[in-house]
Amino acid sequence: MTNHGGNVTVVSNYGHGSTFTISLPRVTLKEVVSYFKSGRKALQKLKTSPPDANVLDILLEEGEMDGWAILKELKGTVDLNEIPVFVSTALDEREKGISLGAKDYLVKPYKPSQLSKVIMHTLLSNGKQGQILIPKGIHEENKG
């Protein structure tokens, strides 16, 4: 816990039980976010300025390179293969995404807090605070 700036306390009352409290500092994900409709442009940005995490939609608007191709390229590139990739898409192909190296695979629609939670957990466990690459339109599609 101390690695994340938090602590654990316990208060015991003999015969009545114990209360464990885990405290972690509030960490705000720095949304140094880049949005891309083009898979090729996103990949170029990833190579020149790697983020702490990548949120990837499999269905990109410009069809020359889909999310599967980006995921394969990322996981096959030595300098980029450690970046956690979170797939956020309408395609229900979780097994394929995980087998290609996605850290998590969320099928739309889902609560926006679900995406934040999996990213936050991963970044904290990796000692990061959050520069994230998110495909254009992901916030708008998941409101509500």
Image (cartoon, rainbow, N blue to C red):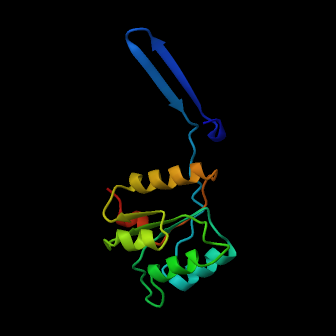
* Quadrant including the N terminus: top right
Which residue is located at x 39 percent, y 53 percent? 114
Q: Nearer the viewer, residue 83 or 18?
A: 18
What residue sits 44% from the left and 21% below the top?
19
Report if residue 137 is visible in the image.
no
- Residue found farthest to the bottom: 64
Number of numbered callouts drawn? 0
* Residue 137 falls in image quadrant: bottom left
Task: Locate residue 47, reporting x and y percent.
Answer: 66, 77
Q: Position of 140 compared to 126: left or right?
A: left
94 to 60, vertically: above or below: above
Q: 96 or 51: which is nearer to us?
A: 96
Would residue 73 appear left or right of 100 to someone viewing this image? right
Q: Quadrant of residue 83?
A: bottom right
Specify the quadrant that holds the C terminus: bottom left
Q: Dividing the picture into quarters, in which one does residue 105 lie?
A: bottom left
Q: Relative to 78, say whether 130 is above or below.
A: above
Is residue 117 something that shows in the picture? yes
Residue 134's place in the image compared with 7, above or below, is below
Q: Position of residue 107 (x, y in %)?
A: 33, 65
Query: Relative to the observer, which residue lies in front, 31 or 47?
Result: 47
Query: Measuring 40% from the left and 15% from the top, which residue is drawn there?
Result: 17
How far across and down, in percent of the image, does residue 70 sit? 51, 80
Q: Nearer the viewer, residue 67 or 126?
A: 126
Q: Position of residue 45 (x, y in %)?
A: 62, 77
